Image (spheres, rainbow, N blue to C red):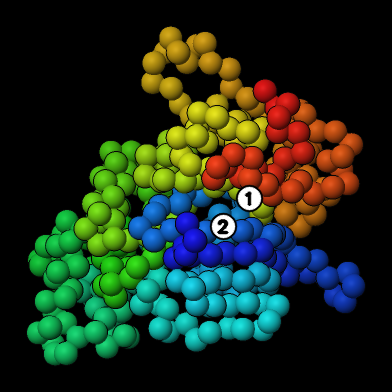
Amino acid sequence: MSNPLIRVEHLKQYFPAGGYGKKKRYIQAVDDVSFTVERGETLGLVGESGCGKTTTGRSILRLYEPTGGRFEYDGQVVFDVEKKIFAPMLPYRKKMQIVFQDPYASLDPRMTVGEIVGEAIDTHKLATSKEDRFNKIIEMLQRVGLNSEHANRYPHEFSGGQRQRVGIARALAVHPEFIVCDEPISALDVSIQAQIINMFEDLQQKLGLTYLFIAHDLSAVKHISRRIGVMYLGRMVELAPSFELINKPLHPYTKSLISAIPIADPKVARNTTRIGLEVDFPSPMNPPSGGRFRTRCAYATEKYDKEKPLWQEVASGHFVACHNYENCQ
């Protein structure tokens, strides 16, 4: 793992939230997040709403200009805020794409599906003629399970699952290497979710794609991801191989998320204790000092109030940020 495709270091994303001068306030959406993604790997990113998952994905693509941190793509610096390095993004748009969460809102209702997929081809001048352009559009649609007849239809004529397939075809049109999947299944029916996840896996095997897969559903993420990162209130609290994270979680917040996964067997479910979090989710505009999870952690001590937990590797590939992870049983 010496030469990852994606390297994110100390990423920060703060949004202005009113006030002036010294009283100016910020929403700390992402605060000091670091991770890598190997070529051909799927890294899952989970956490409750408002923890900064989507903002992380959009910030590394510079859909939001980052407040701080450094991002490398295949060894090349895309941005380094401290050194004021901001590379032109157009060449990287061909290599990095995003599939948005809401297929109902991410497609222009005034454009046909052919125009939506073809727009990226036109922007990057990937077609040599009109015929070549048309063939590329049809190829992308067929790759995601649609056909040539769909090219002349508008988004409102499709179901949610079909619209998401159009969004995936649009992302694939420029032949990217890395795709941020921003909760691509959360707005879909359960039966359709499995189809979309299986399609993502098939595309990865055929095209060698690398994914950052963002989702709420931990059971879906563990199915598709090789490693999983857990975020809480703008920070990464645990990162580990998928199987290890599910079966040997160390951070109390990760344990709470895993205990909330529905269990199909009623006998097993009755004997399983869910770990509840009684205190409300703190505001990212005024997060707790020290360990951000301390206000909801049953194992928190005075040390949590003052010191930020170190991001440390406690086993091979297993990272955690917790003062008391050894005693959180």
Nearest the camera: 231 or 244?
244
- Tell me, yes or no, whether the two marked residues, 2 and 1, touch with CB atoms within 8 Å: yes
Q: Position of residue 324 (x, y in %)?
A: 76, 33
Secondary structure at numbered mark 1: strand
Q: Position of residue 119 (x, y in %)?
A: 29, 80
Q: Position of residue 297 (x, y in %)?
A: 75, 33
Farthest residue, direction front: 2
Q: What's the distance in space between the residues labelled 2 and 1, CA to CA?
A: 9 Å
Which numbered marker is on residue 290? none
Crowding at dot 1, Cα within 10 Å, few <14 / some 14-19 / many 20+, comes out as many
Above or below, 12 against 196 in this view is below
Q: Amino acid at mark 1?
A: Met
Above or below, 163 against 84 in this view is above
Q: Which residue is mark 2?
A: 35
Which numbered marker is on residue 236? 1
Q: Residue at x 42, y 78 (%)?
A: 92
Question: Can residue 215 be seen?
Answer: no
